[in-house]
Image (cartoon, rainbow, N blue to C red):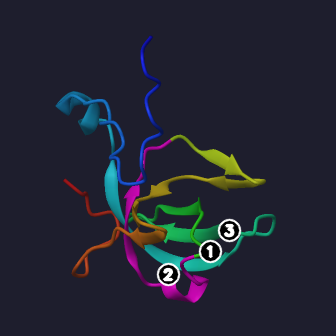
């Protein structure tokens, strides 16, 4: 009889993500977005609603689960890396028209930003 595998330990790395072709990767439009406004989501405890300038007059509303890690005032003026061509989604009744990128480190969330000032809408390549 075969042994049942033990539960993976917390240090077991996750399985690898499927590989994307370069053509698939090129479909993503990554851009610098400058946060103009940030406020608490009216219907969710962990969500914030951001107004983000993606350049060329393109200002978008973005809903992000950042409230446990960032106060709205900490986000205003930040340059964030955004997925600009993601289909819109409605999160707890509020439309989100892009997605910001962030890393998770243990229980912390760290935003992907630019290390120097970059114009809103600058492509990330």
- In the picture of the structure, the residue carrying the numbered disc 2 is 75
Q: Earlier in the sequence, mark 2 or mark 3?
A: 3
Tag shown at residue 113: none
Residue hosting label 3: 46
Crowding at mark 3 (Cα within 10 Å: few <14, some 14-19, many 20+): few
Secondary structure category for the residue under label 3: loop
Q: Earlier in the sequence, mark 1 or mark 3?
A: 3
Element type where label 2 sits in the image: helix
Question: Which of the two labelled residues, at mark 2 and mark 1, occupies the earlier sequence position?
Answer: 1
Task: Between residue 89 and residue 44, name the one nearer to us.
Answer: 44
> Which residues are the magenta region?
69-86
Q: Is residue 4 above or below residue 56?
A: above
**Which corner quadrant of the image does residue 22 belong to?**
top left
Relative to 71, say whether 101 is above or below: above
The x and y percentages for residue 15 are 34, 36
- Few, some or many residues within 10 Å of mark 2 (<14, 14–19, 20+): some
Residue picked out by circle 1: 67
Viewed as shown, does residue 115 lie left or right of 2? Answer: left
Mark 1 neighbour class, 10 Å CA radius: few under 14, some 14 to 19, many 20 or more: some
Mark 1 vs mark 3, CA separation in Å: 5 Å
Disc 1 + disc 3, Cβ < 8 Å: yes
Q: Secondary structure at mark 1?
A: loop
Q: Residue at the spot x=25%, y=57% of the render?
A: 123
């Amino acid at each position: 009889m075969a042994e049942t595998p033990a539960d993976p330990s917390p240090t077991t790395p996750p399985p690898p993500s499927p590989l994307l072709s370069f053509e698939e990767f090129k479909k993503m439009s990554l851009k610098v977005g400058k946060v103009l406004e940030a406020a608490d989501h009216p219907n969710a405890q962990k969500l914030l609603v951001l107004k983000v300038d993606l350049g060329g007059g393109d200002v978008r509303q973005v809903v992000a689960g950042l409230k446990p890690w960032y106060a709205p005032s900490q986000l205003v003026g930040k340059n964030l890396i955004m997925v600009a061509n993601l289909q819109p989604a409605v999160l707890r009744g509020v439309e989100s028209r892009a997605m910001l990128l962030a890393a998770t480190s243990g229980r912390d969330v760290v935003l992907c930003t630019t290390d120097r000032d970059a114009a809103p809408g600058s492509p990330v390549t």
